[in-house]
């Protein structure tokens, strides 16, 4: 009987980790959509997502790292860069307007974030597309 419990436990744990990951991704994508639409004016942190999902932020981050290899912060940063690339490619929005969509009140902070993540400024990225 003890062997049966041990054999079924990892599946339950794995299922809960997958559930947490799926719930986080759904919440994160909803948050990105709300940021893009101007409905959210603040980026959510791991603590904020933890509260939404009723779990400790450390447990959320640990679970995500196990299932996706990325932390909450890593995931959100990657998604913001993906969406910023789309906006820089498909729109004529100013860098400041794009930054504001992602709750950066100062264009310089968005530019520093973008350059830190990609190695080029948003303007350099946009100009590189036109060559």
Image: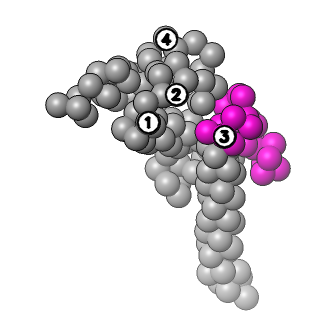
Distance Cα–Cα, label 1 vs label 4: 20 Å
The residue wearing badge 4 is 108
The residue wearing badge 3 is 37
Circles 3 and 2: CB distance less than 8 Å?
A: no
Element on which disc 4 rests: helix
Residue 42 belongs to the span the image colors magenta: yes
| Residue beneath the point at 60% across and 24% down | 100
Element on which disc 2 rests: helix
Circles 1 and 2: CB distance less than 8 Å?
A: yes
Of the image marks 1 and 2, the number of the one nearer the N terminus: 1
Task: Give the numbered dot on residue 22.
Answer: none
Distance Cα–Cα, label 4 vs label 2: 12 Å
Magenta range is 34-58
Of the image marks 4 and 2, the number of the one nearer the N terminus: 2
Q: Is residue 106 above or below residue 38?
A: above
Circles 1 and 4: CB distance less than 8 Å?
A: no
**Image position, residue 98 (x, y; %):** 52, 27
């Amino acid at each position: 009987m003890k062997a049966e419990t041990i054999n079924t436990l990892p599946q339950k744990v794995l299922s809960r980790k997958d559930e947490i990951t799926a719930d986080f991704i759904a919440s994160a994508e909803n948050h990105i959509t709300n940021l893009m639409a101007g409905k959210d004016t603040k980026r959510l942190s791991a603590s904020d997502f933890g509260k939404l999902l009723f779990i400790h932020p450390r447990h959320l981050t640990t679970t995500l790292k196990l299932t996706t290899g990325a932390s909450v912060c890593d995931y959100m940063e990657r998604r913001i860069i993906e969406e910023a690339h789309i906006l820089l490619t498909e729109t004529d929005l100013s860098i400041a307007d794009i930054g504001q969509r992602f709750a950066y009140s100062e264009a310089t902070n968005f530019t520093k974030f973008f350059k830190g993540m990609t190695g080029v400024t948003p303007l350099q990225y946009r100009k590189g597309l036109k060559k």
